[in-house]
Image (spheres, rainbow, N blue to C red):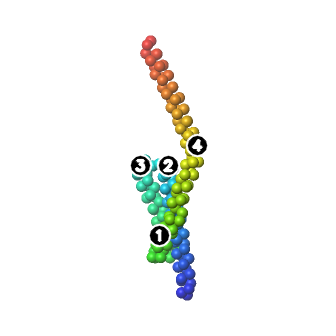
Amino acid sequence: MIAKLIWWEGRTLLSALFLGMVLALEYDCIRIFRRVIRHKNIWVMSAEDILYWIYAAVTVFCMTYEVNDGILRGFLVTGFLAGAVLYRYAFGTFFVKYTTKFINLCLKPLKKALCLIKIGVHKITGCIKAAAVRKRGQGNEV
C-alpha cells in the first residue's frame, strides 16, 4: 500500500516537473514573439502576460484536479517550479536566443520586400497627389 502511494507521488512529481517545463517553454515562445515583433505599448505586453498567467493557472488547476482532486500539495508546487527552473537553465536561454535569430533570419527577405513595396507605394501616392494638385491648380485659372 505504501509502495503504491510512493509510486503515485513519484509519477505525479514527474508530471509536475514536465508541466513546469512546458509552461516555461510556452512563456519563452511569448518572449520570442516579443523579440521578433517589437511591442511599442506596455499595455499589449501586460495583456499577453495576463492571458498567459490565466492559462497557466487553469492548466495547473486542471492537472492538480486530475491527479489529486484539486488539492494543491507542496511537492506539486515544488515540481512545477523545479521544472520551470530546470528548463530555463538547461534550454531556455539558448532556445530564445537562437530561435529568435533563426526567425529574424527567415523574415529578413520578407521585411526587405515589404520595405521596397512601401517605398513604391509612397512614390506612387506622391505622384498621384502632385498630379491632383496640378489639376486642381489648372481648374482655378479658367
Q: Calculate the distance from the C-alpha at mark 3 to the C-alpha at mark 2.
A: 12 Å
* Above or below 81: residue 132: above
Residue 59 seen in the figure:
no
Look at discs 4 and 3 and give the one toward the viewer: 4
- Amino acid of disc 2: Ile
Front residue of this view, candidates 71 and 124: 124
Q: Secondary structure at mark 3?
A: loop
Pointer 4: what residue?
109
Pointer 2: what residue?
37
Residue beneath the point at 45% across and 49% down: 39
Pointer 3: what residue?
41
Q: Secondary structure at mark 4?
A: helix
Image quadrant holding the C terminus, namely top left
**Marked residue nearer the N-terminal end (2 or 4):** 2
Residue beneath the point at 52% across and 71% down: 17
Which of the labelled discs sits on residue 81, or is there none?
Answer: 1
Disc 1 packing (10 Å; few <14; some 14–19; many ≥20)? some
Residue beneath the point at 48% across and 74% down: 76
